[in-house]
Image (cartoon, rainbow, N blue to C red):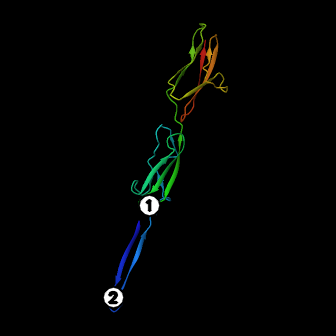
């Protein structure tokens, strides 16, 4: 990329001698029309920056183009930008989605026992930090943070939802049987 001046001199017997110069201009090549490889449509949330290894056909990263990412940590739309460098100009912007991860490690257990006059409820173990759990006694009922209890003989169906940012909501049901 740049301008090079070439000086010339034309000599031929019995003719005038000609001299001069010409400029040879080499412009940077535009990468915006090139194909990008290595980018999937979506990636599952990991809690860390998602940086797919993308390449531009026929070019070398770091020498001929640079890669930058934005909005690539949390669930939603993320962007990768490939910008020309050195003998290349222009840029390519591509988007990809970050989808919610499965919420694992949560164990919700019901209660089953004989009448003893005491109040009993369900047990929740492995609830991740910053996760929220809500309960209802009807599947389509109103969910609240109050854990249902039962004292008298009978059965209470307890529906629960565990939610946390960047994770799929975990739903289930257990019973309190006295």
Tell me the quarter of the image containing the N terminus: bottom left
User: Where's residue 12, x and y in %?
Assistant: 33, 88
User: Where's residue 124, x and y in %?
Assistant: 53, 21
User: Where's residue 154, x and y in %?
Assistant: 64, 12
In this rendering, is residue 49 above or below 161?
below
Is tag 2's residue or tag 1's residue first in the polypeptide sequence? 2
Q: Please name the residue shown 54% across and 29% down the image.
A: 131
Horizontally, is 93 left or right of 61 in the view?
right
Which SS class for mark 2? Answer: loop
Q: Quote the CA–CA distance across marks 2 and 1.
A: 42 Å
Which SS class for mark 1? Answer: strand
Q: Which mark is residue 88?
A: 1
In this rendering, is residue 100 above or below 33?
above
**Quarter of the view holding residue 16:** bottom left
Mark 2, residue position: 12
Residue located farthest toward the top when viewing the structure as drawn = 116
**Quarter of the view holding residue 160:** top right
Tell me the quarter of the image containing the C terminus: top right
Residue located farthest toward the left when viewing the structure as drawn = 13
Q: Is residue 84 visible?
A: yes
How many labels, in total?
A: 2
Horizontally, is 61 left or right of 44 in the view?
left
User: Where's residue 73, x and y in %?
Assistant: 49, 41
Horizontally, is 36 left or right of 175 in the view?
left
Q: Nearer the viewer, residue 102 or 149?
A: 149
Residue located farthest toward the bottom when viewing the structure as drawn = 14
Horizontally, is 19 left or right of 97 in the view?
left
């Amino acid at each position: 990329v740049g301008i090079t001046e070439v000086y010339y001199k034309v000599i031929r017997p019995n003719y005038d001698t000609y001299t001069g110069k010409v400029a040879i201009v080499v412009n940077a090549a535009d990468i915006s029309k090139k194909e990008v490889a290595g980018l999937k449509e979506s990636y599952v949330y990991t809690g860390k920056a998602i940086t797919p290894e993308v390449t531009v056909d026929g070019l070398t990263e770091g020498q001929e183009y640079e890669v930058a990412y934005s909005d690539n940590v949390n669930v939603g739309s993320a962007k990768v930008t490939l910008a020309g460098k050195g003998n290349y100009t222009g840029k390519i912007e591509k988007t990809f989605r970050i989808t919610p991860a499965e919420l694992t490690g949560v164990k919700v257990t019901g209660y089953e026992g004989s009448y003893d006059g005491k109040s009993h409820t369900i047990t929740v173990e492995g609830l991740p930090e910053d996760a929220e759990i809500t309960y209802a006694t009807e599947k389509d009922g109103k969910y609240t943070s109050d854990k249902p209890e039962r004292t008298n003989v009978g059965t209470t169906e307890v529906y629960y939802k565990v939610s946390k940012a960047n994770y799929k909501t975990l739903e289930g049901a257990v019973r309190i049987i006295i």
